[in-house]
Amino acid sequence: MSALLEIDGLTKRFGGVIALDEVTLGVQQGETVGLIGPNGAGKTTLFNCVTGVLQADRGTLVFGRTTPTSLIGLSPHEIAQCGLARTFQNIRLFTGVTVLENVVIGTYARTHAGLLSAALLTADARREEQWARERALELLEFVGLADRADALAGSLPFGWQRRLEIARALAADPALLLLDEPAAGLNPVEKQQLVQLISQLKGQGCSIFLIDHDMRVVMPISDRVVVLDHGKKIAEGPPHAVQADPRVIEAYLGATPGSR
């Protein structure tokens, strides 16, 4: 069975440093894959290559089940239109506009009215704008921010900004959602709420590729876990098996698996 996302032999160098070294993995339709590893392991570099922020030096990236598409050489905008959406380790919101407007912006990868139609407020443009607002409000309800729709995004507490960024990514109706350290900076209650939110997405059949350092976030929600260390894949499998792998314990988890 072909994967929704297939990564084969992915290599990325920064000068003399090999950030990714022949990494191969896949994400199946409807699956949640956790990507873990110590700082500097290459996790965000891999996400950046998948989403076009960086171009790989070698390897293949193929996305899609019915009409597989090579992502190599595509821009981030083109990749988003293929059906991938992501959040960032360092939140990237439009802080000077409203919560609702941030999510509406996320829908534009799925709208079709051109610049001229939007400028002239044609019937098609008005229909798309109404649809975008309704969809954005649905997503804000889903992440628990509907009552803050008119607030400036920059005024939200940090944990709520994380939720808003997820809502904006979902607004693109992605076939695959990539979450880069979504629990970073969250307190224990907010992390538990995040786990519940991602579990709801899983229940809706969403395909998710997730990076996080907190094993209490990654392990309960991942169907499969991939481990990177110094740019190499050192383990892959069900969460319980990965936690017990001596290579993972040595590289990342420390002496007490599951305690971090």
Image: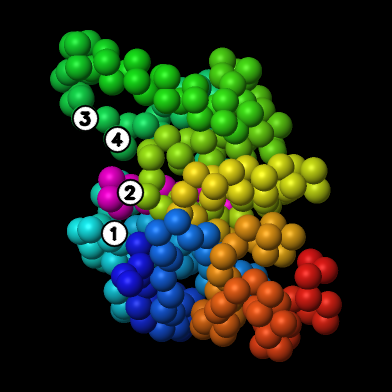
Q: In this view, which residue lies farthest toward the bottom?
A: 246
Element type at marker 2?
loop
Residue in the picture at 16% in, 20% down = 116
Determine which of the numbered discs, if any, sits on residue 200 in the image: none
Residue in the picture at 51% in, 47% down = 87
Query: Mark 3 sits on what residue?
Result: 112
Element type at marker 1?
loop
Determine which of the numbered discs, if any, sits on residue 110 in the image: 4
Badge 3 crowding class, 10 Å Cα cut-off, few under 14, some 14 to 19, many 20 or more, is few
Residue 208: x percent and y percent? Answer: 49, 55
Q: CA distance from mark 3 to mark 4?
A: 7 Å
Q: CA distance from mark 1 to mark 2?
A: 8 Å
Query: Mark 1 sits on what residue?
Result: 64
Identify residue type, mark 3.
His
Residue in the picture at 66% in, 34% down = 160
The answer to whether marks 1 and 2 mark residues whose Cβ atoms lie closer than 8 Å is yes
User: Is residue 15 something one can see in this rendering?
Assistant: no
User: Is residue 77 something one can see in this rendering?
Assistant: yes
**Quadrant containing the C terminus in the rendered view:** bottom right
The answer to whether marks 2 and 3 mark residues whose Cβ atoms lie closer than 8 Å is no
Q: Front-most of 38 and 190? A: 190
Query: Mark 2 sits on what residue?
Result: 83
- Kindly report which numbered mark, 1 or 3, lies closer to the viewer in this rendering: 1
Q: CA distance from mark 1 to mark 3?
A: 21 Å
Residue 135: x percent and y percent? Answer: 42, 25
The answer to whether marks 4 and 1 mark residues whose Cβ atoms lie closer than 8 Å is no
Q: Earlier in the sequence, mark 2 or mark 3?
A: 2
**Magenta stretch in the rendered image:** 79-90
Q: CA distance from mark 4 to mark 1?
A: 17 Å
Residue in the picture at 49% in, 22% down = 137
Q: Is residue 87 magenta?
A: yes
User: Compared with residue 33, is residue 128 higher up or lower down, i.e. above or below?
Assistant: above
